[in-house]
Image: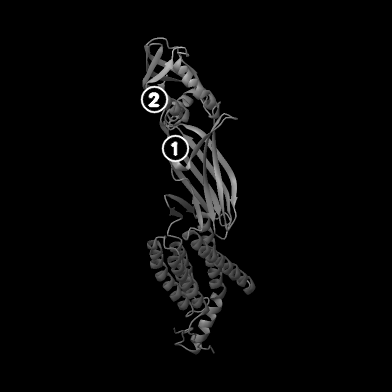
Amino acid sequence: MVENKIKKISIKTIFAIIFYLIIPLFAIFIIIISYDELSKERFIRMIYWIVPTSCIIIMISQLSLKYEKGSLKKYLINISYVIMTLLWVYGFIGGQPVITEQWLEYEFSLHLWKYLSLIFIAALINIIYYTLEWRFYKEEFQNKKEENKSYYPNYEPEKTCL
Amino acid sequence: MKKEQLKMVRIIAIIFSCLVASLTLCNLITVTTHGVNFELPENEDDVKIAYDPLNNDLLFITDFQVKNQGTYDINDIDIKANLYNEKGNEIIDFIKNDLVVSRGSNKNFEIVVSLDLDKVSLSEWLSLIYKDTYFKLNVDVDATYMFHLIDVTVDEEIIFPWTSPLTKFIENNSIIKDLISLIENSSAKKVINKSEDVDLVKKLLKNRFYEETYKELYKLEFEVFNISNFSKKIITKIQAYLPKIEVMLNLEFSIDIKYDKNVIFSEIKGVSIDLW
């Protein structure tokens, strides 16, 4: 018999809220009030990017709780989580691999290619993990599903509510 | 695959994600608040030109500051400065490599671009001496930041006017100014006994200049014609010793001398000085 677990909010979601939404917004807020000379436009643009992407990340993290390990849906949700975090980082660093900073009459550029490569490696490791996890639990999930179907024809694996 | 192995992959993935996340946050705050910053010379006023008589070098001196209030050292700072003449030909190539600015510090780097006057071609030297032109100082800085993950580049071009030292010499040199004012002051009618040396100009110049000449970088020598007529236009040569080259200048003025009962009245006018 399978317990119908009801979780309110997952640790992953809490982490996503803190890390992808609260900390960046707080940091941007501190920068805006501490450095009057900086252009606010750039930070506002950043907020416009961070808020929607982080909201999607939070929703995805919560949604992933609904499905069991081994299910294709969970796997796809995890992959979309990784892609969304990539998009989030992309917006966070200014949406381009080269950041040009203007200071007085001259400017200097930051080339982030190597740094972006590191981000892609991290994303790749996460994708590898989620793929391995899916393949590892796939069989177990299928068996469980079959087993439950025989006992409870209308069975749904897990339910979660926000 | 075992569960432990999967767990291990999970741990690696989490570590990597946390690493990227923390680097992103630290980097954003540092960069956007100008915690990492390069302050370069902005215009020609920031570039000083000096002459080194010992090595016979012309020095273009400027500096730039690297402010690193970030959490990582700035490594491998390479500075490249090229000096171009008005035709766009590179005349000096200056390179400084592998400079480091530690985190939490500000460092000032002096750029001394030295033009060896013994090696410079004659045409370039002549254009330096005689022409009012401009120079382009291209300062190109390459550095790395955050464990070599971020490359920082600065490429600034400073164009500054170059005034011929000769023009400067004529316009600003205190000796020349003194000379002109001395002669002009003498233009008021002056009474001199005939028994005195009629080589009035020579006397005036000599007394004044041989004391002061050697205090200056430029050495002056005078050759003044004897004055024996009542009215004469005098053209005399000034030899100015600029770096590497001896320059001849013309000092031109008129002198009217009137004899009246053994007394000379002299009047000097129309003083001008230019290149010979």
Q: Amino acid at mark 2?
A: Glu
- Is label 1 or label 2 in front? 2
On screen, B28 above or below A141? above
Q: First in sequence: mark 1 or mark 2? A: 1
Kindly report the distance in space between the C-alpha atoms of the residues bearing marks 1 and 2: 40 Å
Q: Residue at x 59, y 47 (%)?
A: B99
For the N terminus of chain A, the image quarter is bottom right
- The residue sitting at the top extreme is B229
Instruction: Say which chain tag 2 marks.
Output: B
Residue A12 location (% of width, % of height) = 51, 76
Residue A67 location (% of width, % of height) = 48, 79
In terms of secondary structure, where does tag 2 sit?
A: helix
Q: Nearer the viewer, residue B141 or B22?
A: B141
Residue B219 location (% of width, % of height) = 52, 24
In terms of secondary structure, where does tag 1 sit?
A: strand
- The residue sitting at the front extreme is B261
Q: Amino acid at mark 1?
A: Lys
On screen, B36 above or below B273? below
Residue linked to disc 1: B136
The tag on residue B184 is 2
Q: Is residue B247 visible?
A: no
The tag on residue B145 is none
Q: Residues within 10 Å of mark 1 (few under 14, many from 20)?
A: many
